[in-house]
Image (cartoon, rainbow, N blue to C red):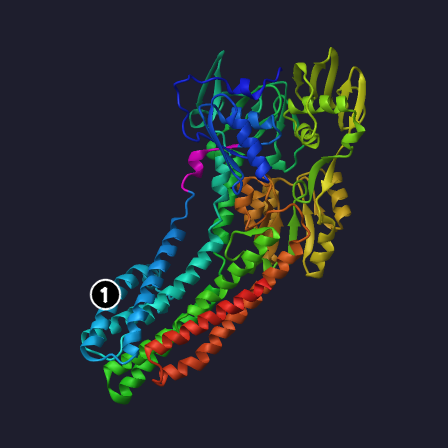
Amino acid sequence: MTAACPACVVGLPPADTQPEQFAVQLSVPSLRCAACIATIEGHLNGLRGVAAARVNLSLKRVQIATHHSAADMTRALDEIGFEAFPLDPKALAGETDPEGRDLLLRMGVAGFAMMNVMLLSVAVWSGASGATRDLFHLISAAISLPAVLYAARPFMVHAWQALRAGRLNMDVPISLAIVLAAGMSLYEALHSGAHAYFDAALSLTFFLLIGRYLEHRTKSAARSAARELAALEEHRAQRKTGTRVETVDVAELAIGDTVLVGAGVRVPVDGTLRAQAAFTDRSFLTGESEPVQHSAGADLCAGEINLGAPFEVTVTAIGADTRLRRIAGLVELAENARNTYTSLADRAARLYAPAVHVLAAVTFAGWMLANGDLRNALNIAIAVLIITCPCALGLAVPAVSTAAISRLYRMGFLVKSGTALERLAGVRTMLFDKTGTLTAPGFAFDASDLSAAQAAVAKALAQHSAHPRAHALAQHLSGVSPAELSNVQEHPGAGMSAEWEGQPVALGRAAWLGQHGDHLILSIAGTTIPLPARERILPGARDLAPALSAAHIEAQVISGDAEDKTAALAREVGVRRWRSTVTPEEKAQIVRDIAQREAVCMVGDGINDTAALAHATVSIAPGSALDATRNAADIVMIGETLADLPKLVRIARQTVTLSKQNFAIAIAYNVIAVPVAMAGFATPLLAALAMSASSITVLLNAMRVRL
């Protein structure tokens, strides 16, 4: 089959036709730097039929405004050495963060109102009395009440939901303290009282919103991996009926239909191969980049990529019944189960919330019995509620987590889950995928071993091939200008042949070119040059096992690759326990079994690892992984080196230690302040100041994680 240049593949749309805005979205895992952005955008924007192309480095995606198919754009990127995977824009819609913006706006309103009310309070503290004092109190009420009703709504909604369910959470005492402080202050303002506590209600709301926003920030990067897996599905297929071929939605297919799968296209359904042979990339199942050759009657799965000539498939499963969708179901089930993890703050709230209400009730009842003054008893009870308001507890974990996440980001780790570090601190087993996690594809020869002409021919042939080894070779020769070839032909499962300056040239498997071995061979006019491939062990991989062992964590390798390759890699990196030829479902089950006994961490990069990542106690993925894999993981490694992974564990354990210290600070503060408030020596205003002091202390302690 003759390969075409990307511009020819893309074709020419009518001049008066405007492409749909960003109609094609591609995942490009190998995106790494500004140079990649310039290369991709420059290449795509230079193609006829492309209106605009935009690269998002953080999401490793390319958005393209064009009428042409995702397969066309994928081939265009393949030509310049970037492996790309089509995504469904509809499945990825709605990735905004309205909750974060809402919390930030509420925090801004509370902070602005608090500062203005405190300015008015200065006049009252300075000795204003009579009508002047009452006027300042009423102005404070006009500012505070709308601000409190708006800014404190998240706490009140969650408190009401808890009460309706017959339980208590941290938001119940928070809401009660805010409502009583604002309500009692309004009563005092309307009855010429000497004291009003609007600033106390606002400061409570402001500090608590800080904690809530910090907690949200640690979760804001998380997106559903199950949704990303669904986005990798093909939603259109070529159905063949007799000699007629029509493009239809996958949902319109039926069991027994015949589907034509073009070169470079993902298989849209599970089915049985009708052709005599086929050559596919099924790395999403095995995690290995080595293509698989199939014979007639072989079972193919939705998501495999056709690396050879077009072939036909008889449909055996569609949509929710495909293996890809079943893996997505495993991921979604695991995500939902992992969301039930109870954080340190939530466990503290179960004990703390009832105690706060009991103390306030005892205080109110005691003062009513002592002097029968309802107004005084209520003021003292409110002071107790404010002084015991769990601001410090609310800040204890998110403040430490945010400081730790900031430090880890500078080290090359993106923490996406608010409780990931808590879970990682307790891990005792760490499972590693092999290919893409501990190793990366490479070549055992130096480019200087080839002459300039040989390197140019090899580069040209490699660029025309869809084989992963050819892609790796093309990248290895990235500084070489490709030769001009003619009569380029692809031989499925074997290699590429062409003519160069009137001489036959070829690049392919050793057996196809009459040689022994399983490596690539370059043939020029009958002269063969071996191009042995190897797996490159990533930096830091050899030091992982002893470093993790020192932290009382056992490292294991779990791979879909062959037994000999897995065993060799395990020996080289010093790992004693390993498993090979493991399917995605088996990986998920292995992780689930270990997680029932002890905390387990899974580190993987492939779609075949996604379910296992989601079932692990905590999971880590390299930044080069696909979107679905990165979104299933709690932590993403931005850099290539694994050397800092043990440091990640140490910081996670330090985070838990500092969080517990913050709880101790909050408890110590309450032990001192609560008796003072219950004895009537603290007004609600003084209680708010004491609460603020404890919150600031907790924040300062949290910053120690940066040291």
Residue drawn where x is 53% and y is 66% of the image: 702
Magenta stretch in the rendered image: 86-94
Left or right of residue 379: residue 629 = right
Q: Residue furthest bottom?
A: 370
Q: From the viewer's side, name the closer residue of 683 and 45.
A: 45
Q: Indicate the position of residue 508 as horizontal and vertical percent values.
A: 72, 23
Q: Indicate the position of residue 282 as horizontal and vertical percent values.
A: 61, 32
Left or right of residue 28: residue 197 = left
Q: Secondary structure at mark 1?
A: helix
Is residue 494 depicted above or below 561 in this figure?
above
Quadrant occupied by the N terminus: top right
Q: Does the magenta portion include 93?
A: yes
Task: Place residue 275 in its image quadrant.
Answer: top right
Residue drawn where x is 31% and y is 70% of the image: 119
Near mark 1 (Cα within 10 A), the count class, few <14, some 14-19 or many ≥20, is: few
Q: Which amino acid type corresponds to the residue marked 1 in the rendered image? A: Ala
Q: Indicate the position of residue 157 as horizontal and vertical percent values.
A: 32, 59
